[in-house]
Image (cartoon, grey):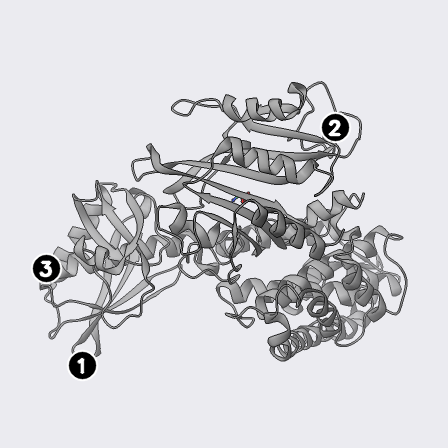
Amino acid sequence: MNAGELRSKYIEFFKSKGHAQIQGRSLLPDNDPTVLFTTAGMHPLVPYLLGEEHPAGKRLTDYQKCIRTGDIEAVGDSSHLTFFEMLGNWSLGDYFKEEAIGMSFEFLTSPAWLGIPLEKLGVTVFEGEEGVPRDEESAAVWKKLGIPESRIRFRPREDNWWGPAGSTGPCGPDSEMFYDFGKEACGPDCGPGCPCGKWLEIWNDVFMQFNKNAEGVYEPLNRKCVDTGMGIERTVTILTGKESVYETEIFAPIIGAILKASGGGSYGVHEDRDRSIRIIADHVRSAVFILGDPKGVSPSNVGAGYVLRRLIRRAVRHGYKLGIEGAFLSVVAEAVIAEFSGAYPELAENKAFVLEELEKEGLKFLETLQKGEHEAEKLLPNLLKDPRKIMSGRLAFKLYDTYGFPIELTEELAAENGMKVNREEFDEAYRKHQELSRSQSGQAFKGGLGDQGEMAVKYHTATHLLHKALRMVLGDHVAQKGSNITAERMRFDFSHPAPMTEDEVATVQAIVNEQIGKDLPVSMEVMSLDEAKAAGAIALFGEKYENQVKVYTIGRSPVDFFSKEVCGGPHVEHTGPMGKFRIQKEQSSSAGVRRIRAVLE
Ligand code: SER
């Protein structure tokens, strides 16, 4: 069984159960700048899970390309991936727990479908907490179907609750399905969900029965929904008797291309080499899908483009480590495109762009790597004078930091010259740097506002407070003309015919600080643009909006609020932690447009 067969079987099965097949969507979400990439099959369906009618009906199925970069540093081991495919089926107010679990069970175990032996399966269900009952209902369904009680585990919210990344929206308990690799249990408590390596999660049925509102209260949904997601790579792994996704047919052509580019050899011989191969395979696959998306982006220093750049550079670095000379990314990319363009025709359509961008970014970084090597060689004669034959960790770090020169290569080069690198000193410098860059740009990998992080989110909420305060003090003619946010400050342009007086500036500043001081909750709702306007939301004139828009409200309730704006987000959950707002400057921007620079302190 390969990925193609699994995709077809899944869709065929759910079609036979009355589901309409819908198209998977772009990897770059339409209406949700709170995340950089589509992270789950349900992601593009949020408006429908919230109550919108879907034109294809109440039972849907699809396969969806997904990217999750939270674990990017872990890629290299045998299981982590940044790109993966998710199969899904949805009930929009149609069937619920019993039927959803019944269909999952049938697809997994029936010889006509996947035919997984019953004794290889285990499941988890939600153990319950205050306000949400223990999910005895799901457990009973599993038991009735034949899963023994010893392999039905009740687990807490951290494991068996699914909801959107944002603070509000549809959510509910889930029931996860695990494959038992047959290894010995790690202890008496080992069971489905145990991370010891015995169990692998392959599918998740989410029972969306609540809407978490802005006050943090779980309101029962009028229309309960089911959202399920099955991981293609993991399922192919277990169906083909493998232990690692990288050993499956899915990765065979990609790893084959990497081995060919590196001049032969095989996979599975040398652990260090294998690790580099896995990193290249995963990262190039992700990069091809990001570049080849209909909304494809180029490598850059912000947002999705920045993630793309990191993926490509890390792949190049590991290619260099494997001793691959010259451009190899396009060779690997061609293997990815050939394998996946049947299911994702956009990859073939955008092939020229994908290969060109990979080559460009790859070569640029390769040059950087080579320059670093050159630099290191120039320094060597001097270094060799050191009687202890030790290269300082500071220098090794400089090579890493300035030229992106991997420490492993510095060590290798040093060793060729009978020297050693002071690794402790390097590690110390590296650690400090990591801490710094994590706090500055780590957010890029967690979703959110690109690499701008937490501060930028605070500034984003501050623009809404400022916008409203300006309208209160200067009048309703004030309209936002532009804004620019960095982690250090904000700039806000707005229409107003005259310079503001000192008094006006002071009043606006005081109003913003007063609202911050009230620690107002910030909530989000999805609605049509007309509904948004009717609810009193400010929308930007001349801006093109989708049919469904997100409306952010800063205030105690939907009617008692300070500000309501149509906006993509993200925003803080509460205004309290934003800090003190200070207007640094009010000046002219262009005719009839004023500019405010402000900081949060
Ligand atoms: N949304 C759930 C998940 O990602 C099920 O699809 O696990």
- Classify residue 287 as left or right of residue 332: left
Could you tell me which secondary element the residue under label 2 belongs to?
A: helix
**Category of crowding for the residue at label 1, using alpha-carbon neighbours closer than 10 angstroms: few (below 14), some (14–19), many (at least 20):** few
For residue 473, which numbered disc appears in the image? 3
Looking at the picture, how far across and down is residue 185, in whole percent? Answer: 76, 25
Q: Amino acid at mark 3?
A: Val
- Residue at (50, 70) in percent of width and height: 295
276 w.r.t. 173: above or below: below
Mark 3 lies on a secondary structure that is helix
- Using the numbered discs, state the Cα–Cα distance from disc 1 to disc 3 in whole angstroms: 20 Å
Q: Amino acid at mark 1?
A: Ala
Q: Amino acid at mark 2?
A: Glu
Instruction: Return the mark for residue 591.
Output: 1
Q: Nearer the viewer, mark 1 or mark 2?
A: 2
The residue sitting at 43% across, 38% down in the picture is 171
Among the two numbered marks 1 and 3 on one chain, the one whose residue lies closer to the N terminus: 3
How crowded pointer 2 is (Cα within 10 Å; few <14, some 14-19, many 20+) is rated as: few
